[in-house]
Image (spheres, helix red, strand yellow):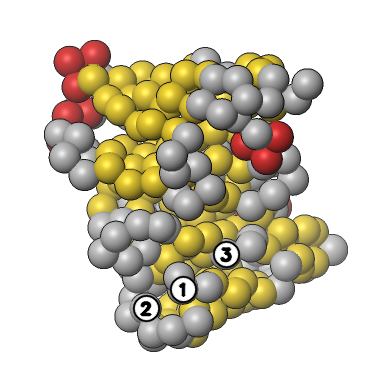
Amino acid sequence: EVQLVESGGGLVKPGGSLRLSCEASGFSFSTYTMNWLRQAPGRGLEWVSSISSRSTFIYYGDSVKGRFTISRDNSKNSLYLQMDSLRAEDTAVYYCAREGGFVHFDYWGLGTLVIVSS
Amino acid sequence: DIQMTQSPSSLSASVGDRVTITCQASQDISNSLNWYQQKPGKAPKLLIYDASNLETGVPSRFSGGGSGTDFSFTISSLQPEDIATYYCQHYDNLPPYIFGQGTKLELK
């Protein structure tokens, strides 16, 4: 069974940093492109970042470019999102999702909540 | 960037009703469109990919259609468990991957 479990969310002050993790199981993690997406409270879905299976191709949304860094460790079946210079508008539930095809997200984690507030 | 306009933003329907949601792209996107269902407090779930392909395990009352700029998502006979918010999502050769604003489906 495919499982994605995010962790690392919490309350952080504006300008602060946080590192999210996503532990994958039940599939060959090293062969899939992985993504981070987010959903602000009461709002819609926003794609955040993508990393190819061997970390060759990395992309970011304009709203996080230069502040967030996506990475992965295939030996640990884990995906990461380093979030720096956090802003109030980064407050959201952050999901990791597997890219099952070109391009759809076929498995999602339960999400981890990030709150940026003073 | 391509813009996706999803409508309606909310919809009230009765059990057994046929429900249709539309998604319009600002330019031709061929069939590069997916549909997701999100129940309150849960992660989104993929229902339809490439405009009209039903994801494995998804009930056949769900369907998708369209190509180019105009797309539709239909529930042929609404069930109580279908109450959720539905999103369309466009993809291209490269990111960003754009979601529609969502349609909140409620029971009448």
Q: CA distance from mark 2 to mark 3?
A: 14 Å
Mark seen at residue B24: none
Q: Nearer the viewer, residue B80 or B7?
A: B7
**Chain of the residue under the numbered disc 2 shown in the image:** B
Instruction: Say which residue label 2 marks.
Output: B29
Q: Earlier in the sequence, mark 3 or mark 1?
A: 1
Rendered view: A69 above or below B52: above
Q: Earlier in the sequence, mark 2 or mark 3?
A: 2
Q: Does the residue at mark 1 contact the one at mark 2 (Cβ under 8 Å)? A: yes
Label 2: which secondary element: loop
Instruction: Say which residue label 1 marks.
Output: B2
Whole-percent x, y for residue A110 in the image: 53, 29
Instruction: Say which residue label 3 marks.
Output: B100
Label 1: which secondary element: loop
Q: Residue at x 15, y 34 (%)?
A: A54
Q: Residue at x 24, y 14 (%)?
A: A76
